[in-house]
């Protein structure tokens, strides 16, 4: 499995350790420019922007803009890109990035046509690249790098990995963790489109061997079977770090479609009961409300000492 931590942060001794370059596709648009400024303010090393037809200009008088991803990658050597283009332009932008050698692509747009997403995922697989999203808040290592649209205030550096299918719950639960003294070593927004480049099970495989990892929080939701698959993987892998889960939509009526495209329950398929049962089999307690997550995590960590 791809070492996502090294792509984002590098390894001690690397010349670019903790200074990984990031390219912003769609940097001159209203949404892209806003969040490019926010990422720069956070300390993310934005090395280039790409907007076809605007090559040669500079963003904020310092970040060079290129017409193509190949030009941007050739000039900077960056391996990370974040996409802010409208959904109808996503396929072209993503292919441009992957063909140029990008290894981590964060896809912010939502409602990407399923066929386009599948084509991008197949290309990423061939290129050995990782796609986060579509419809994701992004990915970050707190206090080092933020590649996404998440606000910085809920997050602080630590040793807990947070994997979330919900953007707002990622913020809320990370804030609860921070206020309880549990900093995060990495947070990943899975994304809310029907098909995502990185599933919960993939994200788990990416982070389970992070050095100094002390625990994990999984934020799932009703619908689909990704939480059940993750619980089974945790059982099979023998992963024994303290882990806590939260399932959004536990009180939703049967066959209710939630805000995310995949969050629909049909009969018992994808129900909260199914997910809670599988997490219990994996010895993972499920919080009934977000504020309970750090309480359960503290309990798990005390038992593991």
Image: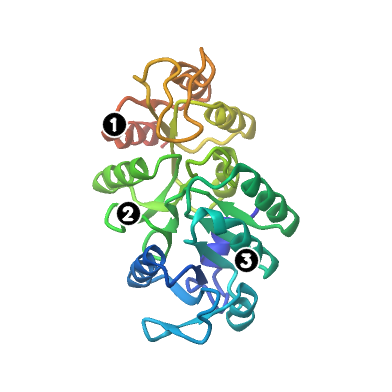
- Sequence-first tag of 3 and 2: 3
How far separated are the C-alphas under marks 3 and 2?
Answer: 29 Å
Q: In which quadrant will I find the C terminus?
A: top left
- Report whether residue 58 is seen: yes
Which of 290/179 is in front?
Answer: 290
Helix or strand or loop: what does disc 1 sit on?
A: helix
Residue tagged by mark 3?
Answer: 97
| Residue in the image at 47% along x and 29% along y | 263
How far separated are the C-alphas under marks 3 and 1?
Answer: 40 Å
Give coordinates of residue 61: x percent, y percent: 38, 86
Residue tagged by mark 2?
Answer: 155
| Residue in the image at 57% along x and 63% along y | 7
| Residue in the image at 57% along x and 43% along y | 196
| Image vertical order of residue 227 relative to residue 266, above or below | below
Q: Nearer the viewer, mark 3 or mark 2?
A: 3
Helix or strand or loop: what does disc 3 sit on?
A: helix
Residue tagged by mark 1?
Answer: 292
Give coordinates of residue 19: x percent, y percent: 48, 74
| Label 3: few (<14), some (14–19) or many (≥20) C-alpha neighbours in 10 Å | many
How far separated are the C-alphas under marks 1 and 2?
Answer: 17 Å
- Sequence-first tag of 1 and 2: 2
């Amino acid at each position: 499995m791809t070492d996502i931590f090294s792509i984002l942060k590098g390894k001690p001794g690397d010349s670019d350790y903790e200074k990984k370059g990031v390219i912003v596709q769609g940097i001159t648009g209203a949404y892209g420019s806003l969040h490019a400024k926010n990422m720069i303010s956070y300390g993310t090393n934005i090395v280039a922007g790409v907007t076809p037809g605007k090559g040669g200009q500079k963003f904020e008088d310092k970040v060079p803009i290129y017409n193509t991803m190949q030009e941007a990658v050739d000039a900077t050597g960056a391996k990370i890109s974040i996409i802010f283009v409208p959904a109808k332009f996503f396929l072209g932008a993503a292919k441009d990035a992957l063909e140029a050698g990008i290894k981590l692509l964060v896809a912010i747009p939502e409602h990407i046509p399923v066929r386009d997403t599948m084509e991008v995922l197949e290309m990423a697989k061939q290129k050995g690249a990782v796609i986060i999203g579509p419809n994701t808040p992004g990915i970050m290592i707190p206090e080092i790098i933020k590649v996404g649209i998440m606000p910085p205030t809920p997050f602080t550096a630590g040793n807990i990995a947070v994997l979330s299918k919900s953007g707002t719950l990622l913020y809320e639960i990370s804030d609860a963790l921070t206020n309880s003294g549990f900093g995060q070593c990495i947070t990943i927004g899975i994304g809310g489109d029907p098909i995502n480049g990185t599933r919960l099970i993939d994200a788990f495989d990416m982070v389970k061997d992070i050095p100094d990892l002390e625990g994990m929080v999984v934020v799932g939701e009703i619908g689909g079977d990704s939480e059940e698959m993750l619980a089974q993987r945790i059982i099979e892998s023998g992963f024994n770090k303290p882990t806590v889960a939260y399932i959004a939509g536990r009180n939703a009526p049967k066959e209710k479609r939630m805000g995310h495209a995949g969050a629909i329950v049909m009969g018992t398929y994808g129900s909260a009961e199914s997910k809670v049962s599988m997490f219990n089999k994996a010895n993972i307690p499920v919080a009934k409300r977000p504020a309970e997550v750090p309480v359960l995590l503290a309990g798990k960590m005390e038992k593991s000492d």
